[in-house]
Amino acid sequence: MRILSSLAFVIAVFISCVAPARAADAAHDADVAAIRQVVQQFQAAIIAHDGKTLGSLFLQDHDSWLAVDDTATWNEIKAKFPTARKVRRSTWQKFVEFVQTSPQPIEERFYDVRIDTNGAVGSVYFNFDFLSGGKINNRGAESWQMVYTEDGWKISSMLFSIGS
């Protein structure tokens, strides 16, 4: 009888330790899935030239957006334009305008997407090819910082490299 009560105690302790971990894992998995959905909406909005949907994915009152040339691209640009800057600032609003008004098909393909989050903030990192008219005109790496708002996950800032 003593063995049975000891076994029951061990099982109870094990269940009490595992249950909160499983709940935390489920919440984390749900956040990752929600962020992945934002990534998919972003890609679909570019293809559809859907500026309204694309704009809705961003934190509205924040516009941190940086483009950085990779070494080879920077060397080419610097040779032609000595006063050019390696890091350029822009906004998500300008990107939305570009997507809406592009006369040809555009698409951004993502590879090796990595998502990390604690449920309040998150990051997305991936390699990409940006296509215009069916041809790659830029490739590099991209990083998003995300926040969980009253309206769900939003992109708060974006940083990407420009290469060929």
Image: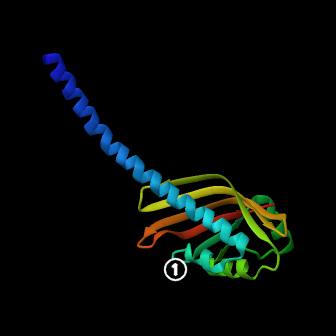
> What x and y, as percent, mark residue 140?
72, 59
The residue drawn where x is 63% and y is 81% is 93
Above/below status of 10 relative to 129 = above
Residue marked by disc 1: 60
Residue 153 makes an appearance in the image:
yes
The answer to which quarter of the image holds residue 134 is bottom right
Left or right: residue 156 versus residue 74 is left
- Residue 108 vs residue 78, the one in the foreground: 108
Q: Residues within 10 Å of mark 1 (few under 14, many from 20)?
A: few
Q: Is residue 48 left or right of residue 38?
A: right
Residue 87 visible in the displayed image: no
Identify the colour scheme used: rainbow
> Closest to the observer: 33 or 63?
33
Location of the N terminus by quadrant is: top left
Q: Determine whether, in the image, residue 150 is placed left or right of residue 155.
A: left
Residue 79, percent from left and from top: 85, 69
The residue under the point 56% across, 76% down is: 56
State the image coordinates of residue 53 (x, y, percent, origin top left): 60, 76
> Which quarter of the image is occupied by the C terminus?
bottom right
User: Residue 64 vs residue 134: left or right?
Assistant: left
Where disc 1 sits, the SS reads loop
Residue at 60% over, 68% down: 158
Pick whichever, 161 or 56, lies toward us: 56
Amino acid type at circle 1 is: Gln
Q: Residue at x 28, y 38 (%)?
A: 17
Residue 10, percent across and down?
23, 27
